Image (cartoon, helix red, strand yellow):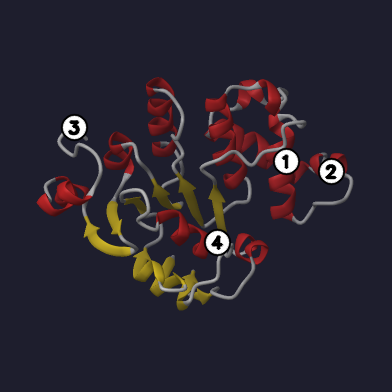
Amino acid sequence: MLETRKLDKSFGAIHVTRHVSLKLERGERRVILGPNGAGKTTLFNQLVGELAPSSGSIHLAGEDVTTLPVAKRVRRGLSRSYQKNTLFDGLTVGENLGLAAAVHTGHATRLWSDSLSKPEVREIVAEVAEQVMLLPYLDAKVSEISYGVRRQLEVGVALATRPLVLLMDEPTSGVGPEMAKGFHDLLNNLPRDLTMLIIEHDMDLAFDVADTITVLNYGEVVFDGLPEAARGSPMLKEIYLGSWEDA
């Protein structure tokens, strides 16, 4: 469903990703781990089209999308939630979801109120809001909701574009233990045919949701395999900044 072939990004003499080759099958849930500076977010920026690779290629559902801009990749089924909120604070939760759904359905217009009135858009908003547990907040302005609910909304906005592949950059960043557990449940309840690639620092979440673990170090893939093998790897315990025994 999503494949990278020898993806490389360098800034002068500095290599941020080095020949990264990954292949995600339909419905696979893969978590990317690695210390700060390992190249995780740079990899995501290349996947979505915000950053052009120095070499290598990116394929989505069998199509080479390496040179496509962000918007065209979204229309082909690649969506992303960010580590930092990228929401419209002056609009409601429902309106934020509706704008993303309108883009997907082709109903987006200059008058966003017209876009949100379309039955197809409203149907997507209701379905996504239920998936990410936002039904009680649909009429609340984003500026009025908690940080944790904003994180849920980020995932919801990405889902409202009806992606084939969802990229999530540290979805539990900045939330407390209770909200982090809520994210565990949220991700586990998403449709199993949705392919997910997740950058995560929360080891409990990583090992709970992942079918596959990939570890980057200095821009290179140093491990790619099952969570059980990752948990027991002495090399990864040495490389990764964190307590693997507590994961």
Task: Give me the C-alpha separation between circle 3 and circle 1.
Answer: 40 Å
Q: Tally the numbered discs.
A: 4
> Circle 1 sits in a helix, a strand or a loop, which is it?
helix
Residue 11 in picture, x, y percent from top left: 48, 70
**Disc 3 designates what residue?**
246
Q: CA distance from mark 1 to mark 2?
A: 9 Å
Q: Mark 4: which amino acid?
A: Val
Residue 18 against residue 241 in the figure, above or below: below
- Which residue bears the numbered disc 1? 98
Query: Mark 1, residues whose alpha carbon is within 10 Å: few (<14), some, or many (≥20)?
Result: many
Q: Nearer the viewer, residue 201 or 38?
A: 38
State the residue at coordinates (45%, 27%). Answer: 175
Q: Position of residue 74 (x, y in %)?
A: 62, 59
Identity, as a three-letter code, of the amino acid under mark 3: Asp
Q: Secondary structure at mark 4?
A: helix
Q: Which residue is mark 4?
A: 48
Q: Quadrant of the C terminus?
A: top left
* Disc 3: CA contacts within 10 A as few (<14), some (14-19) or many (>=20): few
